[in-house]
């Protein structure tokens, strides 16, 4: 750490506050050592901050640095000594403690009835086998959290059959017997049929009733993509087809 970054005023204020907090009892040697360290740091900082600043007596500065190192080592020694004293007191206190022995007292143990075994060795073996058999892993079903899958190709087959019979039906009529998921599947099926040019959409008014008219062949089969019925198919993978 650069000595020019040390805020000596802040360190001094904190040390003075520490001395005042101690009250009438304070360590003169510790205070003297702090004054020595602060003076050394002030001399070093002045030498670094001044353009041509140099220490007057390098030998005195080396001596002060050696004293600072000795003071730091003495502080470490005192810290280790205090920790050792605390460990000694703790071990001495714990050595006078005795744990309560486990189990029942003798006068309570004598009150226990005699143990009578009513099973033979085979019975013990059966009990051990049952106790040591791993319990089956409980699995929580998540089926109730997902809506049942609806095949778009199957709904396309149903729509083709109805449109070939009725020729033209409204979208409401095609989805009257469907729930929300089935309605979405039939809407996707209509888009597939429109792409195959098998149906035409008519809407007289904006937001009005949508009419689907059958314009494909009355017989034969249509090839409907199975991309909506195959989960996990990459976007660039060729989509499989099916006949309707």
Image: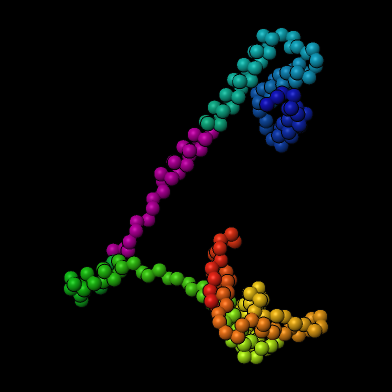
Q: Main secondary structure of the magenta part?
A: helix
In the displayed structure, would residue 172 be above or below residue 97? below
Question: Is-magenta flag for residue 215?
Answer: no
Quadrant of the snapshot with the C terminus: bottom right
Residue 97 position within the rendered picture, expressed as x and y whole percent measured from the top left:
41, 48
The stretch in magenta equals 82-106
Is 47 displayed left or right of 100 in the figure?
A: right
- Which quadrant holds residue 241? bottom right
Residue at image x 53%, y 31%?
80
Residue at image x 68%, y 26%?
1
Q: How many marks?
A: 0
- Which quadrant holds residue 211? bottom right
In the displayed structure, would residue 143 be above or below residue 95? below
Residue at image x 48%, y 72%?
140
Return the residue nearer the eye: 168 or 98.
Answer: 168
Residue 170 position within the rendered picture, expressed as x and y whole percent measured from the top left:
70, 87
Can residue 184 be seen from the camera position used here? Answer: no
Residue at image x 56%, y 66%?
239
Question: Is-magenta flag for residue 105?
Answer: yes
Residue 195 position within the rendered picture, expressed as x and y whole percent measured from the top left:
65, 73
Q: Residue furthest bottom?
A: 166
Is 130 displayed left or right of 154 in the figure?
A: left
Return the residue nearer the eye: 179 or 190.
Answer: 190
In the displayed structure, would residue 41 be above or below residue 14? above
Return the residue nearer the eye: 205 or 140.
Answer: 205
């Amino acid at each position: 750490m650069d000595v020019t970054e040390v805020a000596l005023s802040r360190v001094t204020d904190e040390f003075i506050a520490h001395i005042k907090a101690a009250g009438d009892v304070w360590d003169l040697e510790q205070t003297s050592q702090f004054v020595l360290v602060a003076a050394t740091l002030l001399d070093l900082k002045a030498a670094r901050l001044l353009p041509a600043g140099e220490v007057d007596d390098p030998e005195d500065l080396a001596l002060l640095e050696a004293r600072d190192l000795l003071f730091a080592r003495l502080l470490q020694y005192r810290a280790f000594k205090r920790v050792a004293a605390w460990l000694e007191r703790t071990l001495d206190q714990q050595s006078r403690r005795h744990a309560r022995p486990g189990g029942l007292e003798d006068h309570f143990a004598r009150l226990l009835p005699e143990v009578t075994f009513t099973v033979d060795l085979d019975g013990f073996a059966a009990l051990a086998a049952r106790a040591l058999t791993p319990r089956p892993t409980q699995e929580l079903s998540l089926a109730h959290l997902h809506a049942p899958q609806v095949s778009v190709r199957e709904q396309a087959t149903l729509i083709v059959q109805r449109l070939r019979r009725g020729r033209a039906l409204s979208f409401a009529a095609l989805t009257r017997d469907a729930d929300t998921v089935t309605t979405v599947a039939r809407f996707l099926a209509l888009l597939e049929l429109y792409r195959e040019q098998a149906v035409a959409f008519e809407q007289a008014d904006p937001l009005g009733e949508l009419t689907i008219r059958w314009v494909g062949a009355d017989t034969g089969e249509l090839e409907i993509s199975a991309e909506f019925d195959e989960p996990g198919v990459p976007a660039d993978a060729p989509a499989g087809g099916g006949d309707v």
